[in-house]
Each structure stands twice: as C-alpha cells, then as structure tokens.
Amino acid sequence: MAFQLPEGLHPDLNPLAWIVGTWRGKGQGEYPGIEPFTFFHEVTFNHDGRAFLNYYSRSWISNEKNEIVKPGDDEVGYWFLKDGKIINALLSHSLGVTEGWVGVLDGPRIQLAMDQGYSLPNAPIVTGGSRLYGLVEGELFFAYDMAANGKTLQAHIWSTMERQN
C-alpha cells in the first residue's frame, strides 16, 4: 500500500507525515533502583489541521506470560516543526514531570534532547534525557535514555511498535 499524506495535515508538518497515526508494540525497561521490566506501548501522533502534532503515549507493565499487571506511565504533549527539520516538543508525564525537548528530524528518524524539565514536589527529578524515534522496516522504534534522581544519563526504556492506522 502506498503512503498517503494524512488528510488536513498542516503543510508545515508534511515532513512528519510518516509518524502520524497510532502505533502499538512491546518494550523493555531498566534503570538503577528499578527491576528490569517489560511493557506494552501505544503511541499516537495526530493533528487537527494546526501547525503542531498532538502526542499521546501510554504503557502497561507486563509479566513473563505477556499479561498486563498494572498501568505504566502516560505522556501527553505537542510537537512543533520549524524549517522542516527542527523539532520542539512539550511533554507531560502522569508521574508529575513536564519536559521541553529540542531535536532534529532526518527523514524517518527523530533525535531529541531534553532542554528543560519541571517536576512536582513528589515526582522524580529528571535532569536530562535523549529520545530516538525511527522508522525501521515499517515499525516505529523508540528509545529513551534518562538522567534522574542524581543518576547520569543512561538507557531507560525502548520499544518497537507496529502501525495500527
């Protein structure tokens, strides 16, 4: 099936058209002080015709039998594209953390670095991050490295997701 631009997509977002839609898959995670875990991951990028993408990510922690055992983290946000290659994103987590991200779009690959963050008093203190989104053999690959609670930047979660629509 040939790829088509999403109907009504703002022309400034055409370079991001490949990521618009809902993606689902599985991932793994680890971090100092946290037991390694597996999770189901769903990410949606959609639009309403304005010059930004709406972003929603949710996850569910799974066990060795691939059964959901509890909800994971949720994120909501907005992605903006400048000059066809510079991405600015604002993301808020259900854990009480909001982050600003800046990065570069290079074809079907997005590399983001955390610019600034804010944490509620009872939330983790996230001081740095790196995110990678890429289209690999028709699937969306995602990786998030994080620096939090006094730890240095290191791998945290990664997943591979299939397009749903």
Image (cartoon, rainbow, N blue to C red):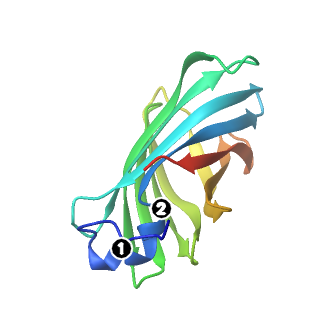
Q: Residue at x 62, y 63 (%)?
A: 134
Residue 49 relative to residue 20: left or right: left
Q: Do callouts 2 and 1 mark residues in contact (Cβ within 8 Å)?
A: no
Q: Residue at x 75, y 48 (%)?
A: 152
Q: Is residue 149 visible?
A: no
Q: Position of residue 110 (x, y in %)?
A: 57, 67
Tell me if residue 57 comes above or below residue 136 in the rendering. Answer: above
* Residue 26, numbered label: none
- Residue 159: quarter of image: top right
Tag 1 secondary structure:
helix
Question: Please, which residue is most extreme toward the front here?
Answer: 1
119, 100: nearer the viewer: 100
Q: Along the polypeptide, which appears first: circle 2 or circle 1?
A: 1
Q: Residue at x 58, y 48 (%)?
A: 162
Identify which amino acid the numbered label 2 is placed on: Ile
Residue 60 relative to residue 157: left or right: left
Identify which amino acid the numbered label 1 is placed on: Leu
Q: Is residue 153 visible?
A: yes
**Residue for badge 1:** 13
Tag 2 secondary structure:
helix
Q: Position of residue 33 (x, y in %)?
A: 76, 26
**Residue for badge 2:** 19
- Residue 65: quarter of image: top right
Q: Residue at x 48, y 31 (%)?
A: 95
Residue 130 relative to residue 102: left or right: right
- For label 1, count other residues whose C-alpha is less than 10 Å away and answer few (under 14), some (14-19) or many (20+): many
Q: CA distance from mark 2 to mark 1?
A: 10 Å
Q: Position of residue 165 (x, y in %)?
A: 42, 50
Tell me if residue 57 comes above or below residue 70 in the rendering. Answer: below
